[in-house]
Amino acid sequence: MYVPVGEPDISISVFDSTISIFRMIAPLESVTIREFTFSKYRSTPVFIFNGTGEIAFQNKSSHLDIPEVSSVNDLKINNYKKMIEEGLDSIVFHAHDEKVYQVELRGIKKEDLLLAYFNDVTELVALNREIEDTQREVIYAMGEIGETRSKETGNHVKRVAEYSKLLALFYGLSKDEAEKLKMASPMHDIGKVAIPDAILNAPRKLDLDEWKIMQTHAELGYKMLKHSSKPILQAAAIVANEHHEKFDGSGYPNAVVGEDIHIYGRITAVADVFDALGSERVYKKAWELENIIELFKDERGKHFDPKLVDLFLSNLDAFVTIRDKFKD
């Protein structure tokens, strides 16, 4: 039989209210359901898990909206015991039935409990995706401006974006980092908008003075983007500035060496050169795949990060599939 031992002092915060409830009552085994009134009638799901991860309490909304949750393990919270022991707060996300919930978590050490409050953020997530899609379209469009000025197709920036994301994942970057690089890499040559057409589209090898002017596009692109506070454009500034650096320090604009070159720059260098060699330009014909492979082998540790070359060549079929999907 459950026996209440006191009335809670309800606070402003939902978390504080529930904490107050548990601090005013006996151990969970002797608590009546009315002590959970505040949580019970909340319109969004509420769970309270015990120290072993089992459900100690859940409100009606949790039964109706997310019936698949039977323990804390269903929320993929691996550190819940630490959260309880140290009284930590955290936020995770849980998707169910086309809805996305933001889950506010709080460990309660004294009562050996984990509180979980669910808030439906489906509309916010959808809005955020729309914003990201818009950003992506704008970035692609800006990237294409630089490429079309040099008589290259918009599919070049799309292929470089896809190659960069794939290589980033093979390298071990997180999905979020790989996606950010995918969105940033189309801006790698944005600085070309400031290069004169006579140099940009010269159907011949550039002379020394022209080549020096051409090289400035990396720094120009960086200066265009570096003042942005947006993570994607900050990443794009890095890519613009460093994708022509070489692993052995012979690149430009700053002759950076080895892993001092940002990983975004090292990855985009592989992606850009692979696509450029396999594409026809005003000054050259497209290379055969066998010749491209030989160049990457020869430039391993010179132009390119050797680890990235190994990953690229080991997974070459995946990159060729992308190339064939986005043909000019």
Image: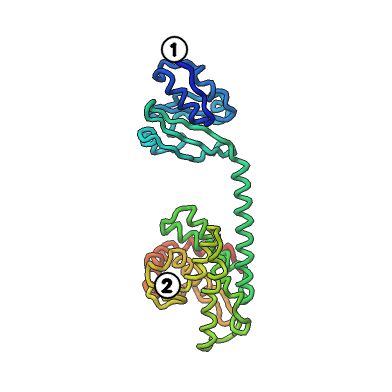
Q: Considering depth in this image, is 16 or 127 the residue closer to the camera?
A: 16
Residue furthest top as drawn: 1
Q: Quadrant of the C terminus?
A: bottom right
In the image, which disc is placed on residue 296? 2
Q: Amino acid at mark 1?
A: Val
Q: Is residue 298 visible?
A: no
Q: Is residue 324 above or below residue 194?
A: above
Count of numbered tags = 2
Q: Label 1: few (<14), some or many (≥20) within 10 Å?
A: some
Q: What's the distance in space between the residues labelled 1 and 2, CA to CA?
A: 74 Å
> Crowding near pointer 2: few (<14 within 10 Å), some, many (20+)?
many
Helix, strand or loop under label 1: loop
Picture coordinates of residue 197 (x, y %)?
63, 81
Residue 196 x, y percent position in the rendering: 61, 81
Label drawn at residue 226: none
Q: Is residue 297 above or below residue 202?
A: above
Q: Residue at x 48, y 40 (%)?
A: 91
* Residue 166: image location, x then y, percent: 48, 59
Mark 1 / mark 2, whichever is N-terminal: 1
Q: State the residue position of label 1.
A: 3
Between marks 1 and 2 in the image, the one whose residue lies nearer the viewer: 1
What residue appears at the point 59 percent right and 45 percent down from the top-left corner?
Answer: 125
**Label 2 sits on what residue type?**
Phe
Q: Is residue 39 above or below residue 202?
A: above
Colour scheme in the image? Answer: rainbow
Is 250 displayed left or right of 126 in the figure?
A: left
Classify mark 2: helix, strand or loop. helix
Residue at the spot 46% in from the left edge and 61% down from the top edge:
167
